[in-house]
Amino acid sequence: MTERLVLALLLSLLGLGAQAQPPLAPAQASRAGAPSPALGGLSLKARQIDLSLSDAIYLGLRDNRAIRSAYLERIAQKFDLRVAEDRFTPKLVVRGNALSNHNQADRYRQGDIAPSTTLLTPYGTRVSLGWAYRHTDADLAGLTRNDGANLTLIQPLLRGAGRDVATAPVQLARLGEQVNRLALKDTVAQSITRIITAYRALLQSQEQLQIAGDALARARQLLEVNQAMIGAGRMAAFEIVQTEAEVATQELGHEEARNQLDAARLALLQLLALDLDTPLVASDAVQADALEVDAAQAMAQAETMQPNYLIQLIGNQQAAINLTVARNERLWDVSLVGGGGQVRDRNSHNGSSRSWENYVGVQVEIPIGDLSTRQAEVQARVGVENQQVRVQEARQQLQRDVTNAVRDIAVRWRQYQIALRAQTLSQRKLQIEREKLTVGRSSNFQVLSFENDLRSAQNARLNALISYLNAQAELDQTLGTTLQSWDIALND
């Protein structure tokens, strides 16, 4: 009769530990960071802040310092483009002065004003229009005023001529703006990937704490079973030492898991630029679905969306423009020039007079013995060839990265499936062994060994799942589809 009661007690104590451990549901995941009730710890539920992955990403877009810094840089970059595109608008300059002077002959006061405007056309034509006025009031010489206007036109025929050369600075600025936008996209995508990785590290730490708590609870239950068996005379008293050592080991593992959880929480809070004392809890479910990716389609998508690869393609265009400009700089400076002007003088003693002149002609400047222009062309030509090499290298690197990312997705999913099956078998194996222990057909050592196997299998399943989820984020970044996957538009 006594043995039946002891057996019933042992089975009731083992009931909880013998149950299978399915993946966490969303409600369970939100509590993964809380201490196990069996540990007597304080629950964070009353003051914790549940955060989903999408909420973490949108908080990061608002407050992440790397993203904010990138947007601040865009202010200066966009103004640089505005300055470059202002190249062909008229420029007005107004000069003036006022003097009061005297010499041995007289004392006078003089004022000058000379507004002028210049215009550069997309074909290299330079037009200048100016007007000057001078007012001189002398004690003896009297009042003198003169004013005049002049117009100058210069049309390059060789060096500096043509739309391709004249608009080269604007074209380079616009290409640079495309590079800056792609760099912003890459910065935002990298920040999002870091946030995703940090969030899942927090989620992983929460589950590891739960696994450690469950292992500690099972160890304590086994200790109670051992005490009951010793009390019934079914186990030698010294054999309980193994279980007590296991309890101490599990307590140590639980403390380490709690420490890792705090470190993961602080890392995520820093990325989100939030107060480090915020009691944040990752609330997403730890689960995943199979993702099928076609390598050829992935490569085609990466070639049209991957920022770093597109930047190299734009570099090809920039290098070609620089070579065009460098070759043009080696030409003679031959220009048509023309202009005219008139001047009117008025004097309080001598009356007024007017004069004018017009001119047209050709001006030529021939550099002789100047190797600097040849140097610039050689450097530009080498730059074009180097850029072609960089594009080839970038494409091969992109193909390698895409291939690795696609293969990694498939491998990580298979690893997760294997780890999930291993966990299920380990749970079943431990359940059978603990039932055998209650009828005296097993030993503490064997049960503790299977406990370690289960804990390792649970951690292997968790690590495989987190690695698979992170591989998805890495694939998005490799393809340049991170923003598209999260439906994010750059507010630029």
Image: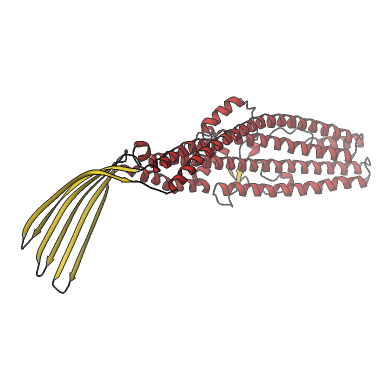
Q: Which residue lies furthest to the bottom in this view?
A: 104
In the rendered image, is residue 466 in sight? yes
Which corner quadrant of the image does residue 334 belong to? top left
Query: How many circles with numbers are drawn on the protein?
Result: 0
Residue at position x 79%, y 36% in the image: 454
**Depth check, front residue: 43 or 386:** 386
- Is 432 positioned to the left or the right of 208 in the image? right
Where's residue 124, x and y in %?
A: 32, 41
In the rendered image, is residue 492 in sight? no
Tell me if residue 92 comes above or below residue 430 in the rendering. Answer: below
Where's residue 306, x and y in %?
A: 54, 34
Where's residue 77, x and y in %?
A: 43, 46
Where's residue 250, x and y in %?
A: 78, 46
Q: Which of the image's four quarters has the C terminus?
A: top left
- Is 164 positioned to the left or the right of 233 in the image? left
Q: Residue furthest front?
A: 368
**Depth check, front residue: 25 or 2:** 25
